[in-house]
């Protein structure tokens, strides 16, 4: 079984698109030790640790640590639920591209802004366009009109000053980090096989809970340790809490563009919190394209919400898979098949965990709603999502671990068959029954999401305190 070209499919959030690149350390000169008559160290006490559990959930886990330290009882799954990320999915299907993007990965700043607005949390976003990674992030954010502070455009404000000021104010600080420089043994896989983060890659979120100018160190809470073999599991040995020298810390922060999320307590949840959240979630489930891609609704190759699953179900055919294998990696069709099966299972696993946890959290978010019918319809998706998921797809590290699942078996056996026969159509057709079974799971999830979304929208429409103009139900077209 060949797996050598599947590396790009692994570690989909923390390690995706990483490769070696030189990382300068000259900006360490910005780290100015304060005078002896000023505060030389500070730490935010009693910051709880939140393990991210699944690759891809580092930012909401880091946010949960910060919010709980503020006195806001928001768990990882409370954040995924009240941001709508746990109830969102996007598919792509065009020539060489076929796959899923879980809600937590889709337009992250968009769901983050929605979350902050309805929860009444203040956020300041920083980056440094003078770094390669920061410049890339700036182009993306600018294209969507998101507000941010650019360290490169300030003659006085520096990342370390923001860090000190935030912690001195009693708040931990969430930053983007390059795992290549983080000390836990869990990140040796990055050092040994991947290399430093490059522009276009996805960084890892960690929380700074203290600094010490005397020892030139910072203290970190890292939600991502324990994600990958051979260290899979909750890090009860405490390695999630560690110190870093200013030099190495600056390396990891600068390599990730000095991207920084500064949260503070604001005004608290909005007065119509439940109505806004239920409306938003219903549209994400149904697949309202405006909810996902306002201004870009006509991107025909994108499916949203329920239609994302419908689209993938429709793509489980000889014609669609043949086209994917023909265009993707050009002549390396076996790797294309294996990559497709592995990636579908990886992203389904991420969304399954997010969706299930978000469903558990939602009743506490919407206490005035009778969610009994919604929960019945929404949970109908769970057994089908479970059938297309497996944790080994996202914990096995740089290799792909064999597993007895329908997605893995179908696409990896299909690739083996093609390597023997060199007949692409026959190799795909041989597994038509398995593809029909996979498609049936996708369609069942789509039906559950659409029905649940309509039920939730109906509850909002029947609320006598909500104007009819607030209720918008639009079903988007399938992929």
Image (cartoon, grey):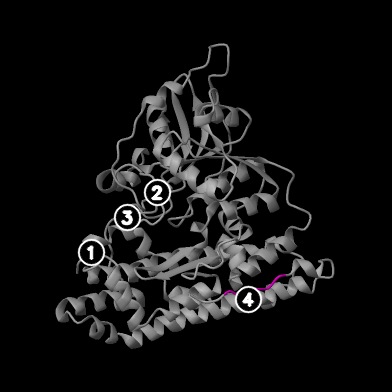
Do the residues bearing badges 1 and 4 touch, measured as CB atoms within 8 Å? no
Distance between mark 2 and mark 3 Cα atoms? 25 Å
Distance between mark 1 and mark 4 Cα atoms? 39 Å
Q: How many residues crowd around disc 3 within 10 Å: few (fewer than 14), some, or many (20 or more)?
A: some
* Residue 265 as seen in the image, left or right of residue 219: right
In the image, 303 versus 446, the foreground residue is 303
Range shown magenta: 472-476
The quadrant of the rendering that contains the N terminus is bottom left
> Would residue 106 be visible to someone looking at this image?
yes
Distance between mark 2 and mark 1 Cα atoms? 24 Å
Residue 352 within the magenta-colored segment of the rendering: no
**Disc on res. 138:** none
Distance between mark 2 and mark 4 Cα atoms? 35 Å
Residue at label 4?
Answer: 452
Residue 473 within the magenta-colored segment of the rendering: yes
Residue 42 in the image: x percent, y percent?
56, 26
Quadrant of res 246: top left
For label 3, the SS is: loop
Q: Earlier in the sequence, mark 1 or mark 3?
A: 1
Give the vertical position of 64 relative to 413 (above or below): above
Residue positioned most to the left:
420
Do the residues bearing badges 2 and 3 touch, measured as CB atoms within 8 Å? no
Residue 410 in the image: x percent, y percent?
31, 78
């Amino acid at each position: 079984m060949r797996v050598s070209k599947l590396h790009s499919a692994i570690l989909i959030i923390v390690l995706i698109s990483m490769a070696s690149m030189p990382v300068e350390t000259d900006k360490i000169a910005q780290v100015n030790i304060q005078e002896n008559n000023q505060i030389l160290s500070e730490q935010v006490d009693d910051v709880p640790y939140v393990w991210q559990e699944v690759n891809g959930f580092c930012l909401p886990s880091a946010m949960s640590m910060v919010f709980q330290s503020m006195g806001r009882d928001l768990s990882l799954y409370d954040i995924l639920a009240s941001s709508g990320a746990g109830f969102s999915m996007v598919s792509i299907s065009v020539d060489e591209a076929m796959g899923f993007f879980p809600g937590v990965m889709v337009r992250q700043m968009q769901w983050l802004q929605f979350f902050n607005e309805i929860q009444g949390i203040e956020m300041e976003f920083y980056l440094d366009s003078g770094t390669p990674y920061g410049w890339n992030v700036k182009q993306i954010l600018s294209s969507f009109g998101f507000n941010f502070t650019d360290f490169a455009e300030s003659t006085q404000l520096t990342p370390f000053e923001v860090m000190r000021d935030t912690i001195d104010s009693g708040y931990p600080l969430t930053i983007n980090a390059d795992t290549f420089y983080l000390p836990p043994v869990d990140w040796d896989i990055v050092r040994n096989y991947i290399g430093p983060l490059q522009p276009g890659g996805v960084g890892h979120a960690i929380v700074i809970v203290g600094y010490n100018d005397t020892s030139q160190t910072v203290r970190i809470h890292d939600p991502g340790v324990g994600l990958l073999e051979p260290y899979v599991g909750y890090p009860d040995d405490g390695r999630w809490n560690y110190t870093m020298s200013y030099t190495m810390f600056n390396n990891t922060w600068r390599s990730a563009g000095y991207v920084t999320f500064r949260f503070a307590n604001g005004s608290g949840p909005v007065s119509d919190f439940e109505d806004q959240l239920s409306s938003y979630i219903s549209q994400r489930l149904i697949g309202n394209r405006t909810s996902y891609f306002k201004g870009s609704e006509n991107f025909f190759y994108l499916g949203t919400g329920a239609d994302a699953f419908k689209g993938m179900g429709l793509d489980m055919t000889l014609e669609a898979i043949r086209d994917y294998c023909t265009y993707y990696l050009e002549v390396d069709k076996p790797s294309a098949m294996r990559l497709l099966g592995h990636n579908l299972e990886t992203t389904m696993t991420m969304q399954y965990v997010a969706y299930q946890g978000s469903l558990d959290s939602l009743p506490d978010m919407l206490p005035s709603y009778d969610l009994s019918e919604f929960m019945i319809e929404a949970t109908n998706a769970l057994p089908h999502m479970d059938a297309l998921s497996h944790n080994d797809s996202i914990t096995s590290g740089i290799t792909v671990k064999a597993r007895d699942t329908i997605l893995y078996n179908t696409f990896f056996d299909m690739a083996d068959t093609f390597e023997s026969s060199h007949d692409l159509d026959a190799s795909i057709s041989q597994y038509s029954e398995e593809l029909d079974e996979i498609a049936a799971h996708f369609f069942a999830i789509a039906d559950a999401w659409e029905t649940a979304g309509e039920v939730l929208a109906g509850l909002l429409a029947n609320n006598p305190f909500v104007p009819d103009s607030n209720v918008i139900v639009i079903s988007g077209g399938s992929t």
